[in-house]
Image: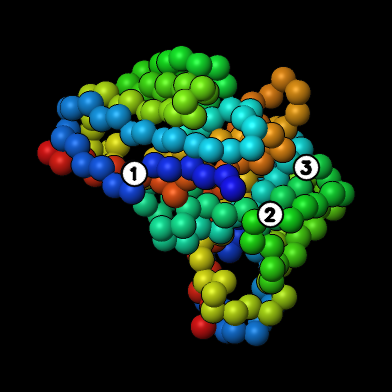
């Protein structure tokens, strides 16, 4: 079966750095996405990785290792508004998005 | 402003009633999707459409039907609602195909309660 694992919940301090990990086992791979979802709102697109390596976009970076079936989302200089759920999703060989259950990130002052 | 709209925002429905959730996008995306999101389970695909005139079943299609008469609209119908269909429903669209990343963009969601 297809599976995406990410921690259920993480806590971090304002101004710090946090890394949210995602491991996947899917039938094929056509890219990995990270989305942010604030409570009561829709998911919004953060990043897309299809090749190994690090993609940086402001305070957020996303890393991919296809051989290890592994990705992480790195958030720097944490702000209170970063409190949200972060969803990892993989596009499989049929171009269907397989979603993780999400990681709830709690930022403390 | 381009994007996806959903209606209604929320709805309380008696079990056994028929209900259609509306979804419209103005980005001319070829693919559209319906998801439900339940606490602790993440997003689950109900139905999808790769292009106008075609639809397909996702992970949890039972009790739901869709149609795609044109590019912009993708309504989701619950023929006879049951309490287990209480959930938040998200519509999404993407520009799928070669030279695209298939990034999905989401509507604001419909919160449905079936009593």
Residue A19 versus residue B12 in the image, above or below: above
Kindly identify which chain the residue marked by label 2 belongs to: B
Crowding at mark 3 (Cα within 10 Å: few <14, some 14-19, many 20+): many
Kindly identify which chain the residue marked by label 1 belongs to: A
Looking at the rendering, which quadrant does residue A14 occupy?
top left
**Residue identifier under label 3:** B50
Q: Is residue A108 left or right of residue B6?
A: left
**Residue A56 x, y percent position in the rendering:** 41, 16
**Residue identifier under label 2:** B58
Q: Nearer the viewer, residue B51 or B110?
A: B51
Q: Secondary structure at mark 1?
A: loop
In the image, are marks 1 and 2 on the same chain? no
Q: Is residue A78 left or right of residue A62?
A: left
**Residue identifier under label 1:** A7
Q: Is residue B24 visible?
A: no
**Residue A19 x, y percent position in the rendering:** 30, 29
Q: Secondary structure at mark 3?
A: loop
Q: Which mark is residue A95?
A: none
Q: Secondary structure at mark 2?
A: loop
**Residue B22 x, y percent position in the rendering:** 67, 59
Looking at the rendering, which quadrant does residue B2 occupy?
top right
Per the model, the C-alpha gap separating discs 3 and 1 is 32 Å
Q: Nearer the viewer, mark 1 or mark 2?
A: 1
**Residue B67 x, y percent position in the rendering:** 80, 58
Kindly identify which chain the residue marked by label 3 belongs to: B
Crowding at mark 1 (Cα within 10 Å: few <14, some 14-19, many 20+): some
In the image, are marks 3 and 1 on the same chain? no
Per the model, the C-alpha gap separating discs 3 and 2 is 12 Å
């Amino acid at each position: 079966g297809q599976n995406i694992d990410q921690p259920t919940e993480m806590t971090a301090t304002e101004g710090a750095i946090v890394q949210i990990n995602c491991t996947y086992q899917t039938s094929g791979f056509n890219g990995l996405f990270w989305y942010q979802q604030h409570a009561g709102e829709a998911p919004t697109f953060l990043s897309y990785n299809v090749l190994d390596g690090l993609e940086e976009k402001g305070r957020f970076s996303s890393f991919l290792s296809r051989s290890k079936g592994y990705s992480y989302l790195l958030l720097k200089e944490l702000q209170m508004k970063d409190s949200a759920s972060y969803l990892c999703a993989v596009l499989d060989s049929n171009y269907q998005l397989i979603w993780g259950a999400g990681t709830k990130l709690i930022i403390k002052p | 402003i381009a994007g996806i709209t959903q209606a209604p925002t929320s709805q309380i429905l008696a079990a056994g009633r028929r209900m259609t959730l509306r979804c419209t996008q103005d980005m001319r995306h070829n693919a559209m999707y319906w998801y439900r999101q339940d606490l602790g389970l993440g997003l689950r695909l109900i139905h999808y459409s790769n292009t106008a005139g075609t639809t397909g079943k996702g992970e949890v299609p039972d009790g739901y039907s869709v149609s795609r008469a044109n590019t912009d609209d993708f309504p989701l119908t619950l023929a006879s609602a049951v309490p287990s269909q209480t959930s938040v429903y998200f519509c999404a669209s993407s520009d799928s195909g070669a030279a695209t990343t298939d990034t999905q963009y989401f509507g604001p969601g419909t919160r449905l309660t079936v009593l």
